[in-house]
């Protein structure tokens, strides 16, 4: 439920309105970040107003998550009470959902729940890998470092995503324009052209027949054109669930360029987590179990589960890595070599952090060059569309002379 909180400063009379996504007025006040010098007036946002607000309001953003974890790390470093630490973050976030989540977490903590359980109740905001890291921080007593690590990781991820989006703007615009041109020609030019060819008894090539069928659908059933648009909207809206499907993850590992990005992303998160847990003196098998839970890619989950199994059966960490190195892709042997060095020198956490940093740097470089990587694909797609359109329109013209001479 959405609640509108109007805050009024008792000294200056200045007003500010905030939307909080929560169930009770008490939580709405906490989520709005009300201070001691403010009064609050709360109204429920219901019906069409709620629907409109949810549709047009600010969506959950990774920036809010970064701000939340950064703020928690600073508060925990200064030994501020846990509940107060969360309440202080209400004015750092900007979306109704995060404001409501902060209020709900503070209420759960006041009821005696652990931080990991309280944040785990907000599963739409905090994934299983983040909750697993928080549990590890609770066990090792290093929650501030965990919060900083999560914030840093999310910040880098947000940076890469922004670069990917900026790189996709040009190809997306060009592709949309090309699709609009095809649709306009299908509605205007193709019907007249097909009518002429049919009257002359000219045989149409398959490409022209396909364009004719598309034109017929768009002219007589224009609503059908909304189906692919709605499909794309639903696809991107559920991208998070889609990317977590094992079959999709396996497919991405087989695609050129994409496979490298996926592997580097999964490996950077996993090895950074393992280094953090080992440095916190968490038992190795437990650290591997937690790392498996935090790995978003199923292949890396399996890798760390297998490594844990081998270690439980008496093998060393380098040997376990070597047996399962085929799951790490082309860099598997290199990583195993680094683990052997770590075992001999006792510098495991340093080398694991080094691996994670190398992958993060490579991801950053890839993000900067994403437009150059996508450009050839865009050219191929546009070339195919233009080529098909030209062939579909002009192929019958080339045989039109023969038809007219026969007549």
Image (cartoon, rainbow, N blue to C red):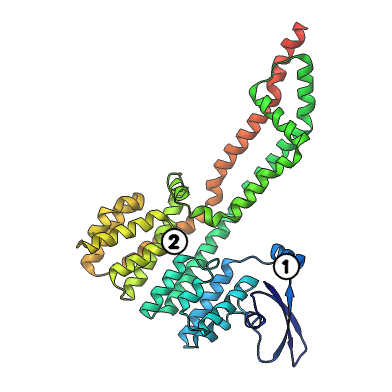
Number of numbered discs on residues: 2
Q: Is residue 174 visible to us here?
A: no
Residue at (65, 33) in percent of width and height: 386
The vertical placement of 384 against 135, above or below, is above
Q: Secondary structure at mark 1?
A: helix
Label 1 neighbour load within 10 Å: few <14, some 14-19, many 20+ = some
Query: Looking at the image, is mark 2 or mark 1 earlier in the sequence?
Result: 1
Q: On the image, numbered disc 1 is attached to which residue?
A: 50
Residue at (67, 48) in percent of width and height: 230
Which of these two is toward me, 243 or 189?
Answer: 243
Disc ID at residue 360: 2
**Label 2 vs label 1, nearer the camera:** 1
Q: Position of residue 391 (x, y in %)?
A: 66, 25
Q: Quadrant of the N terminus?
A: bottom right
Q: Secondary structure at mark 2?
A: helix
Q: Position of residue 400 (x, y in %)?
A: 73, 15
- Cα gap from disc 2 to disc 1, whole angstroms: 40 Å
Q: Do the CB atoms of the residues marked 2 and 1 lie less than 8 Å apart?
A: no
Judge left or right: residue 242 versus residue 28. left
The vertical placement of 184 against 373, above or below, is above
Residue at (62, 46) in percent of width and height: 171
The vertical placement of 57 against 334, above or below, is below
Disc ID at residue 69: none
Which of these two is toward me, 228 or 142?
Answer: 228
Q: Is residue 136 visible to us here?
A: yes
Q: Position of residue 185 (x, y in %)?
A: 75, 33
Judge left or right: residue 63 versus residue 189. left
Q: Position of residue 378 (x, y in %)?
A: 59, 42
Label 2 neighbour load within 10 Å: few <14, some 14-19, many 20+ = many
């Amino acid at each position: 439920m959405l609640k509108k909180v109007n805050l009024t400063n008792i000294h200056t009379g200045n007003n500010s309105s905030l939307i909080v996504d929560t169930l009770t007025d008490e939580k709405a006040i906490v989520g709005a970040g009300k201070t001691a010098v403010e009064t609050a007036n709360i109204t429920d946002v219901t019906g069409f107003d709620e629907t409109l607000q949810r549709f047009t309001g600010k969506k959950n953003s990774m920036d809010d998550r970064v701000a939340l974890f950064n703020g928690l790390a600073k508060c925990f470093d200064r030994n501020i009470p846990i509940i107060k630490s969360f309440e202080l973050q209400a004015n750092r976030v900007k979306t109704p959902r995060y404001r409501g989540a902060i209020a709900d977490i503070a209420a759960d903590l006041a009821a005696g729940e652990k931080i990991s359980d309280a944040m785990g109740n907000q599963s739409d905001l905090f994934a299983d890998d983040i909750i697993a890291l928080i549990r590890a921080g609770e066990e090792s007593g290093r929650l501030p470092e965990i919060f900083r690590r999560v914030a840093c990781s999310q910040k880098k991820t947000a940076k890469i995503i922004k670069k990917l989006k900026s790189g996709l703007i040009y190809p997306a615009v060009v592709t949309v324009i090309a699709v609009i041109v095809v649709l306009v020609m299908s509605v205007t030019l193709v019907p007249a052209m097909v009518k002429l060819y049919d009257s002359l008894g000219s045989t149409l090539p398959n490409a022209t027949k396909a364009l004719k069928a598309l034109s017929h659908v768009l002219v007589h059933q224009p609503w059908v054109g909304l189906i692919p648009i709605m499909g794309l909207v639903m696809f991107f809206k559920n991208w998070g669930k889609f990317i977590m499907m094992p079959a999709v993850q396996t497919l991405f590992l087989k695609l050129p360029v994409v496979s490298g990005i996926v592997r580097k992303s999964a490996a950077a998160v996993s090895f950074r987590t393992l280094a953090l847990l080992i440095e916190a003196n968490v038992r190795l098998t437990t650290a591997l179990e937690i790392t498996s839970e935090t790995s978003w890619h199923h292949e890396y989950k399996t890798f760390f589960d297998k490594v844990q199994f081998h270690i439980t059966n008496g093998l060393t960490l380098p040997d376990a890595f070597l047996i399962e190195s085929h799951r790490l892709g082309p860099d598997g042997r290199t990583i195993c070599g680094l683990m052997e060095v770590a075992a001999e020198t006792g510098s495991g956490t340093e080398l694991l952090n080094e691996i994670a940093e190398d992958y993060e740097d490579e991801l950053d470089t890839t993000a900067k060059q994403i437009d150059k990587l996508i450009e050839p694909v865009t050219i191929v797609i546009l070339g195919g569309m233009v080529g098909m359109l030209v062939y579909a329109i002009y192929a019958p013209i080339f045989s039109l002379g023969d038809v007219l001479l026969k007549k």
